Image (spheres, grey):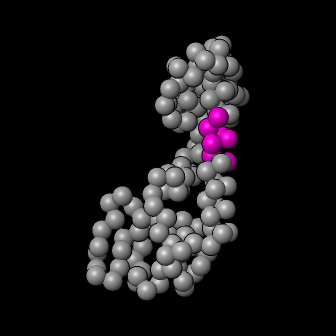
């Protein structure tokens, strides 16, 4: 989205900070639950499972869980894991922007929009930046 630099307030409200924090904490809760579920479903102890999962992303953990339940012929669980994975895929880009990009402010014309820069943010015009918006 292109917008004028004059439309950018480089400070963010407390409410926006709280929303960012809530998103990060909620995703961490979900990630932790999927990790514990994966470890227990595969019959591993927590320490061994933590080593085995390492930095595996949540999408991959869910894929492994789905494969396990399909292998065990538990199709209702496998189907629900597939639904969960698709639902998470809907929101992962927003989560990644919030967690991995710099928050540079809010729009003055719409203070409910929080502005995050992309790592490949480019000056497309002197008075505009190419940025991703998250509401």
The residue lying at 55 percent from left, 36 percent from top is 58
The residue lying at 28 percent from left, 80 percent from top is 125
Residue 88 placement (x, y as % from top left): 59, 45
The residue lying at 53 percent from left, 24 percent from top is 53
| Residue 42 seen | no
The answer to if 91 sits in the magenta stretch is no
Q: Tell whether 125 sits left or right of 22.
A: left
Residue 93 placement (x, y as % from top left): 50, 53
Quadrant hosting residue 2: bottom left
Residue 107 or 38: which is nearer the viewer?
107
Q: Indicate the quadrant containing the C terminus: top left, top right, bottom left or bottom right.
A: bottom right
Q: Is residue 131 above or below residue 84?
A: below
Residue 77 or 47: which is nearer the viewer?
47
Quadrant hosting residue 36: top right
Q: Indicate the quadrant containing the N terminus: top left, top right, bottom left or bottom right.
A: bottom left
The answer to if 31 sits in the magenta stretch is yes
| Residue 85 seen | yes
Q: Is residue 23 above or below residue 15?
A: above
The residue lying at 65 percent from left, 48 percent from top is 25
Count of marks placed on residues? 0
Residue 101 placement (x, y as % from top left): 45, 57
Report the predominant secondary structure element of the magenta stretch.
Answer: helix
Q: What are the residue bounds of the magenta stretch?
A: 26-32
Q: Is residue 81 above or below residue 107?
A: above
Q: Tell whether 133 sits left or right of 39.
A: left
Residue 83 placement (x, y as % from top left): 64, 40
């Amino acid at each position: 989205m292109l917008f004028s630099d004059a439309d950018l307030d480089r400070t963010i409200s407390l409410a926006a900070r709280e929303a960012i924090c809530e998103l990060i904490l909620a995703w961490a809760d979900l990630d932790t639950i999927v990790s514990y579920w994966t470890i227990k479903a595969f019959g591993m102890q927590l320490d061994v499972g933590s080593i085995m999962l390492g930095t595996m992303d949540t999408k991959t953990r869910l894929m492994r869980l789905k494969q396990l339940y399909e292998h065990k012929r538990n199709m209702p669980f496998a189907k629900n894991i597939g639904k969960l994975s698709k639902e998470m895929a809907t929101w992962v880009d927003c989560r990644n922007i919030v967690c991995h990009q710099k928050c540079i402010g809010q729009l003055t014309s719409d203070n409910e929009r929080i502005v995050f820069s992309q790592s490949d943010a480019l000056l497309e015009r002197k008075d505009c930046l190419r940025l991703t918006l998250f509401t």
